[in-house]
Image (cartoon, coloured by chain):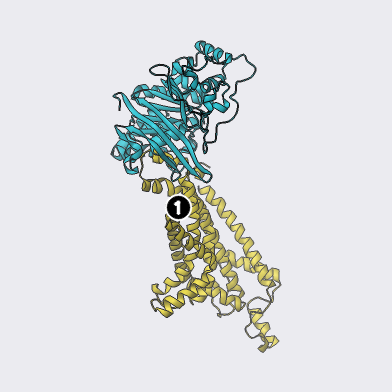
Amino acid sequence: MKKDNILEVNNLKVSFKTHSGEVQAVRGVSFDLKKGETLAIVGESGSGKSVTTKALMGLLPQPHGFVKEGSILFDDKDITKMKDKNMQAIRGKEMAMIFQDPMTSLNPTMKVGTQIMEGLLKHQKLGKEEAKKKAIELMNLVQIPNPESRMKQYPHQFSGGMRQRVVIAMALACNPRILIADEPTTALDVTIQAQILELMKDIQKKVETSIIFITHDLGVVANVADRVAVMYAGKIVEIGTTDEVFYNPKHPYTWGLLGSMPTLESDEEELFAIPGTPPDLIAPPQGDAFAARNKFALEIDFVEQPPMFKVSDTHYAATWLLHENAPKVEPPESVKKRIESMDHSEGATR
Amino acid sequence: MARYIGQRVIYMIITLFLIATISFVLMKLLPGSPLANADKLTEAQQEVIFEKYGLNDPIPVQYVNYLGGLIQGDLGISFKYDNRGVSDILADRIGPSAQLGIQALIIGTVLGILLGLVSAIYHNGISDYLSTIVAVLGTSIPSFVFAGLLQYFVAVKWGILPVATWNGFEYSILPTIALAIFPMATCARFMRTEMIEVLNEDYITTARAKGLAGTAIIFKHGIRNALIPLVTILGPLAVGLLTGTLVIEQIFSVPGIGEQFVTSVTSNDFPIIMGTTMFFAVVFIVMILIIDILYGLIDPRIRLSGKD
């Protein structure tokens, strides 16, 4: 492992056994996570972003989901080969997760305080009183008012935003080195979303954890991420710093994503949409999975999968358009205009 | 809470009044005479007996008298056992019935829950199939068949336990088992379904993400949530036990309320039939109240706030 990397994922393949065949949800994903950085993974539903993080946590749904190939290195150990017993010591302590829907991710019959204390009691061997104190501290950290009395309440007595704060407090309990946030704001209404994002940025400064942020909301990405990985049909199609991916996107799919992002400035009547639907991952296409929806597709796209072409030391994209023999193709006008307008809009600049 | 219970008690009284009225009317519609050998008695003799028990009064008067007695806690006097009060007879016989019922309910639900848990945890494994088979047999074969089999094998053939009657704890074992099989099977099937569902909930993933071990997840997060729907079927199950005792007590000659009830029905002993019906009704209604209160204890979402 490289020195400042905390996590290295190499050629990870995850599949699910179903009645109609093996669904190849993740088809060879590689990335690394540096200490203290926020990596956003974006992509549409079914692109494999959630499955990737479930594999990181060893939480693939059993018995159907399994890691088919590849490795996930954490502390120089391959956690895909680890027994569940050893993974238990990592989950919640070294790596913690914030889930999408705070309405269902808390146990309805257990007091909120107890749910926060559970991880502390398990991993930090604290006594009950100490754990209670720490839980109150955590609830203060995530800005839940009156933590002493709120601790004794049940999830149904909390609003959605407050519940997500509880979930975040739970995840932060043991000062994890990696925090995985799986669409943490998707289920919340917009005003609450902004609060939760602010809170997460605040907390990251305070506790210096690395964050993997899963989302399909590019506005959120621009707001929180240092680097962005764009996933499509179980593969990373473009990865780079946030600036590189937003201002110099190379993959036609990234163009499509940026183009379909609504902004206040957009003067076009219609929102840009990527035509077609993602491919069936039981029988993925032979060539580039995006080729069938891509108006810039070359002949080779239908035959052979593109490798990751290097754009800069930090920026890579998997599209044959970057091959030296490929015709020179510019992003469509509307996407270019969109990128230019982002320079001036407050939300997308960091 | 107090106000809620008060409200419930009022409803309970109304329900009991309706049950008393309906069963009184049904009794009066029943053919047959309470006299064992009516044809051997002269008209005058019958008249004397009817007079003694108030059976010559017009039916509305009988009804009012009956209700009046009920309100004072007087269930009347048995036709058959001369001058013995119905409450007296019931009090004599409640011991064995209560013991059987409670033993069967506890053994049935506890074993059923365990069986269901094993099924759910080893979902689609051998132990799941085995306990599913047990559950299906238990729900589909009537308890009196089990009773007969138990008597034949355990008592007659192997001679391990007494066949029937009631002379101590070992006499209660076979009827308890026969009675417990149905609730056990029902609980097992229910628990399996609920637990499998609960184990797929998001909060179980959250618990796993905290690094909790499998057993801790099942005991701390799984069982309580799976028990909530199970509490709902406890009411009908308990009632099933009540009616179950009628048959089982008869088969094992247990001197309980059920056996008394069956005997009284065959001899048209109206006051005892009515009294037992009322007694069963009260037990049932109180059971439902207890279950509703239990619900609130298990599920905080429906806990009644103290302020109401």
Provide the residue designation for mark 1: B123
A92 to B265, vertically: above or below = above
Please name the residue shown 36% across and 34% down the image: A71
Q: Quadrant of residue A87?
A: top left
What is the crowding at mark 1: few (fewer than 14 residues within 10 Å), some, or many (at least 20)? Answer: some
Q: Quadrant of the N terminus of chain A?
A: top left
Please name the residue shown 53% across and 48% down the image: B3
Q: Quadrant of the C terminus of chain A?
A: top left
A220 and B307: which one is in front?
A220
The picture's colour for chain A is cyan
Q: Quadrant of residue B56?
A: bottom right
Please name the residue shown 60% across and 73% down the image: B271
The picture's colour for chain B is yellow
B301 to B6, vertically: above or below = above
B113 to A341, vertically: above or below = below
- The chain identifier of the residue carrying mark 1 reads B
